[in-house]
Amino acid sequence: QNQSELSEMVLELMNSNIMFFTRLIKRGQMDKSIRKDVEAGELSVIILGSIRHLVTVWRLSGFILDLNYSGKKLLRSLELMMAI
């Protein structure tokens, strides 16, 4: 936060990730595999925020959390949330 150049790079990376996921979700919405009643951009933020939260909990727990199990569980929940 104190280094503007680094902050700009991180923001660009975050925006790039959001745009990537938004494009994927829009494709899924077009082929009717992902619900359309939630905006693709909002779903992207929910997905990336959920992943970021899981990784933070894993790191703060001293890497004790079973990241593989928790990640699969999160992925299944996200799939259910986006399903038609």
Image (cartoon, rainbow, N blue to C red):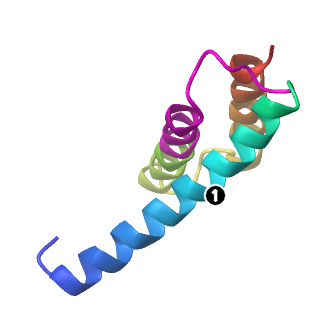
Towards the viewer: 72 or 78: 78
Please tell me which residue lies in front, 10 or 62.
Answer: 10
Q: Residue at x 54, y 46 (%)?
A: 48
Residue extending farthest front: 30
Give coordinates of residue 74: x percent, y percent: 68, 32
Measured as percent of width and height from the top left, residue 53 is found at 47, 43
Question: Is 73 left or right of 38, judged from the image as shown?
Answer: right
Residue in the image at 56% along x and 41% along y:
44
Secondary structure beneath disc 1? helix
74 with respect to 57 (left or right):
right
Query: Which quarter of the image is occupied by the C terminus?
Result: top right
Residue at image mark 1 = 20
Image coordinates of residue 22 in percent, x first then y, are: 61, 46
Prevailing secondary structure class for the magenta stretch in the rendered image: helix
Q: Is residue 83 above or below residue 14?
A: above
In the image, 36: left or right of 63? Answer: right
> Residue type at mark 1?
Phe
Residue 40 versus residue 23 in the image, above or below: above
Instruction: Tell me which residue sits at (63%, 58%) in the image.
Output: 20
Question: Any magenta on residue 14?
Answer: no
Q: Is residue 5 above or below residue 19?
A: below
Q: 35 or 83, which is in the foreground?
A: 35
| Residue 81 screen position, x and y as percent | 69, 18
Q: Looking at this rendering, what residue extends furthest in the left direction? A: 2
Q: Which residues are magenta?
A: 33-50
Q: Nearer the viewer, residue 80 or 22?
A: 22
Residue 38: say if magenta.
yes
Badge 1 local density, few (<14 within 10 Å), some, or many (20+)?
A: few
